Image (cartoon, helix red, strand yellow):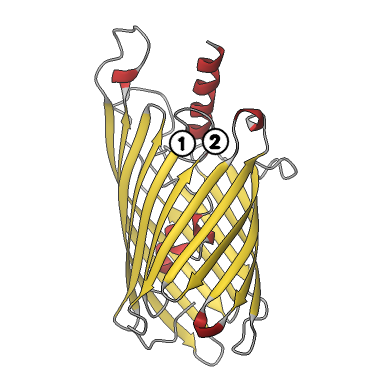
């Protein structure tokens, strides 16, 4: 019985925390050289087709803990625009959600001499959320049939870049959700707002390394909850545009700065067209004694190099 209560608390914590809100769960996937997963404004930045597959297992050691797989791809459309798609499957105990996001972005060059760019992006989102009540181990005649809800939504985003500085603002899930199918009393607003900004030090053609501090802030309108990621990455440039990088991320609730939700190292490498990254997050709250943390693996391909000669690249 104790284990049942623990599992229930963990699942509820995840629902209220990072995922299962008819939205794409956001961890640190964006730090695996793939900011498109958090903002449509990044679609088509770069002169190649970027593909990233991601697998994340949260709270390793706990049965039915959150587990997610995703696939992201974006490419340049002509000289000034980009297209992208993001697919995901997120399972958490008796709940699961699947969906996709189709994105379009347009990129403006404000100044070639100063590498100054402004990008606008928008996305259509489709999310299918399901509660598998058939496997509930309880006897309650009022709970029958699987509960399922499909939500259609939209995102908008802006991205400004000036030389080595970048700042991105995204508003996600602009429409409210329909609560009639669940008959429960909870907020109908899915909107959340995200700010992602950073600076790449020592970025130049003659440099063989880069240091990139960044900040990622999320604010959820439904309950006023907000979190911040403080990130630091070191990237070493090798021959033929190959590189490897290492970094660390520190996430906390904005009213509990010194009490992190998780903290962990990350590392990745790009060799020719192939990309690989791994991150590990240590849970720093009372769940620590019940699991061995969160593991995330990203593999990818960068193909069709040179599909555009536009200067608007990363």
Q: How many marks?
A: 2
Question: Which image quadrant for residue 71?
Answer: bottom left
Whether tag 2 and tag 1 are in contact, CB under 8 A, the answer is yes
Q: Which residue is drawn at 50% across and 71% down?
A: 270
Q: Earlier in the sequence, mark 2 or mark 1?
A: 2
Residue found farthest to the left:
145
Image coordinates of residue 164 in percent, x first then y, are 60, 78
Q: What element carries label 2?
A: loop
Up-down relation of residue 22 to residue 45 (above or below): above
Up-down relation of residue 156 to residue 16 (above or below): below
Image coordinates of residue 100 in percent, x first then y, are 30, 51
Q: What element carries label 1?
A: loop
| 232 sits to left or right of 85 | right
| 280 sits to left or right of 308 | right
Question: Which image quadrant for residue 22?
Answer: top left
Q: Mark 1 points at which residue?
A: 66
Near mark 1 (Cα within 10 A), the count class, few <14, some 14-19 or many ≥20, is many
Q: Name the residue under label 2.
A: 59
| 59 sits to left or right of 85 | right
Residue found farthest to the bottom:
113
Near mark 2 (Cα within 10 A), the count class, few <14, some 14-19 or many ≥20, is many
| 227 sits to left or right of 23 | right
Image coordinates of residue 34 in percent, x first then y, are 47, 64
């Amino acid at each position: 019985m104790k284990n049942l209560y623990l599992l229930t608390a963990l699942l509820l914590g995840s629902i209220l925390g990072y995922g299962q809100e008819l939205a794409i769960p956001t961890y640190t996937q964006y730090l695996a050289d793939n900011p498109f997963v958090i903002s449509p404004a990044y679609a088509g930045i770069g002169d190649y087709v970027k593909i990233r597959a991601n697998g994340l297992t949260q709270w390793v050691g706990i049965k039915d803990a959150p587990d997610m797989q995703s696939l992201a791809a974006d490419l340049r459309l002509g000289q000034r625009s980009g297209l992208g798609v993001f697919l995901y499957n997120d399972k958490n105990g008796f709940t699961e959600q699947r969906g996709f996001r189709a994105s379009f972005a347009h990129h403006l060059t404000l100044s070639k001499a100063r590498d100054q760019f402004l990008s606008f992006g928008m996305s259509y989102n489709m999310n299918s959320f399901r509660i598998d009540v058939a496997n509930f181990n309880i006897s309650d005649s009022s709970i029958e049939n699987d509960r399922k809800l499909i939500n259609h939504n939209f995102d908008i985003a802006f991205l400004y870049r000036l030389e080595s500085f970048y700042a991105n603002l995204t508003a996600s899930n602009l429409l409210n959700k329909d609560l009639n199918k669940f008959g429960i009393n909870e907020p109908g607003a899915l909107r959340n707002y995200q700010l992602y900004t950073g600076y790449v030090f020592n970025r130049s053609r003659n440099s063989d390394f880069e240091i990139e501090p960044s900040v990622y802030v999320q604010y959820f309108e439904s309950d006023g909850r907000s979190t911040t990621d403080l990130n630091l990455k070191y990237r070493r440039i090798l021959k033929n545009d190959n590189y490897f990088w290492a970094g660390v991320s520190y996430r906390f609730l904005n009213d509990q700065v010194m009490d992190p939700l998780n903290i962990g190292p990350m590392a990745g490498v790009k060799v020719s067209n192939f990309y690989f990254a791994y991150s590990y997050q240590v849970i720093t709250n009372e769940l620590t004694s019940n699991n061995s943390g969160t593991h995330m693996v990203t593999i990818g391909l960068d193909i069709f190099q040179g599909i555009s000669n536009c200067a608007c690249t990363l």
